[in-house]
């Protein structure tokens, strides 16, 4: 029988973020029975004005932040005020984040859903699907703004101070060793907010939601992540208007191209007193 393990901000007794399970550890030719704490992942449905939009596997923790951050980074809403209400509903098959959004945001969502119908039915099918990919997920367009207008500068050492502070605040990772984290740091590298999830994109969405909920200006700090910097991670950062993304691991080549186009300063391999800057180095002085 699995034992439930609770953490602050988790989904409660129905959906804890971690569980203790019996296991056997083999080491030096001997086997030993022990209890292992494992991260949970739960289906989380995002529903807008009664219409189901997506189901994500996520850690059932900080779900209001996840709802807001996902909505912002996916361009479903343009600002936090466009979400009028968030209800968290637990059921036997997972968790539903039921959101009421402004009429204009709902109209854009419906238009996006209609445009995608038939273009991606079997994945990337020919020129139309590739053209759709370029238009919707390629470069950051005028609606997104990107980070070109952010003139703030940061000391390189600030990236390392923030990254070094992450470990002590990754409570779920310390218990399970299985989750990613995204952190928000001020210009001096002081870590202000950390969010965790089994998915690196989810952790970043939760962080974006937390920062937006607190009303923190996007140009007043930067993001550090305990993962590689993929295309989607850069895209979400740019859409939030955040100018600097620092990753503990490598970026992809597509992520670097997007960061350059979107005005994001992208740093990778931020560890052991070293980092590599791939785009817009003028912000790190």
Image: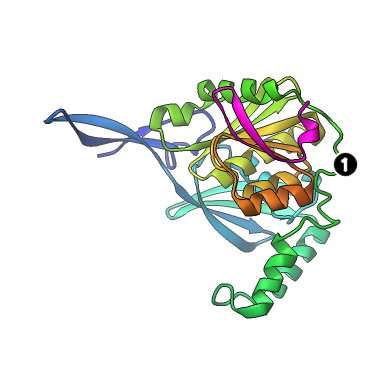
Residue 181 covered by magenta stretch: no
Name the residue rendered at 40%, 36% in the picture: 18
Residue 241 placed where, x, y %? 79, 43
Residue 32 position by quadrant: top left
Report the magenta residues as a range.
Answer: 268-285
Is 273 in the magenta? yes
Q: Which residue matches tag 1? A: 149
Q: Looking at the image, which residue sits at the far left? A: 29
- So how many labels did they put on this image? 1
- Pick whichever, 27 or 47, lies toward us: 27
- Which of the pair 74/129 is nearer the observer? 129
Give how far across and how far down residue 33 sits, in percent.
17, 30
With respect to residue 62, does 239 lie above or below? Answer: below
Q: Kindly identify the residue that appears in the image at 23 percent across and 35 percent down.
A: 22
Residue drawn at (15%, 28%) of the image: 28
SS for callout 1: loop
Residue located at (68% from left, 78% from top) = 128
């Amino acid at each position: 029988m699995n034992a439930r393990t609770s953490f602050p901000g988790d989904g409660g007794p129905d959906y804890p973020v971690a569980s203790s399970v019996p296991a056997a550890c083999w080491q030096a030719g001997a086997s030993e029975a022990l209890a292992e704490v494992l991260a949970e992942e739960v289906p989380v449905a995002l529903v807008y004005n009664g219409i189901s939009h997506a189901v994500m596997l996520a850690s059932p923790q900080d779900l209001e932040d996840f709802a807001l951050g996902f909505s912002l980074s996916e361009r479903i809403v343009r600002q936090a005020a466009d979400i009028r209400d968030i209800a968290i509903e637990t059921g036997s098959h997972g968790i539903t984040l039921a959101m009421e959004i402004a009429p204009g945001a709902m109209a854009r969502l419906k238009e996006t859903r209609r445009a995608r119908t038939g273009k991606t039915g079997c994945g990337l099918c020919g020129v139309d699907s590739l053209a759709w990919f370029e238009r919707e997920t390629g470069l950051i367009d005028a609606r997104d703004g990107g980070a070109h207008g952010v003139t703030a500068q940061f000391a390189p050492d600030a990236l390392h101070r923030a990254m070094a502070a992450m470990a002590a605040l990754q409570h779920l990772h310390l218990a399970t060793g299985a989750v990613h984290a995204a952190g928000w740091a001020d210009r001096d590298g002081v870590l202000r907010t950390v969010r965790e999830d089994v998915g690196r994109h989810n952790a970043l969405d939760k962080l974006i939601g937390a920062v937006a909920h607190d009303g923190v200006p996007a140009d007043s700090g930067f993001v550090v992540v305990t993962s590689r910097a993929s295309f989607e991670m850069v895209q979400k950062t740019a859409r939030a208007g955040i100018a600097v993304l620092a990753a503990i691991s490598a970026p992809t080549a597509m992520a670097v191209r997007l960061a350059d186009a979107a005005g994001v300063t992208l740093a990778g391999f931020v560890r052991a007193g070293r980092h590599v800057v791939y785009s817009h180095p003028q912000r790190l002085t």
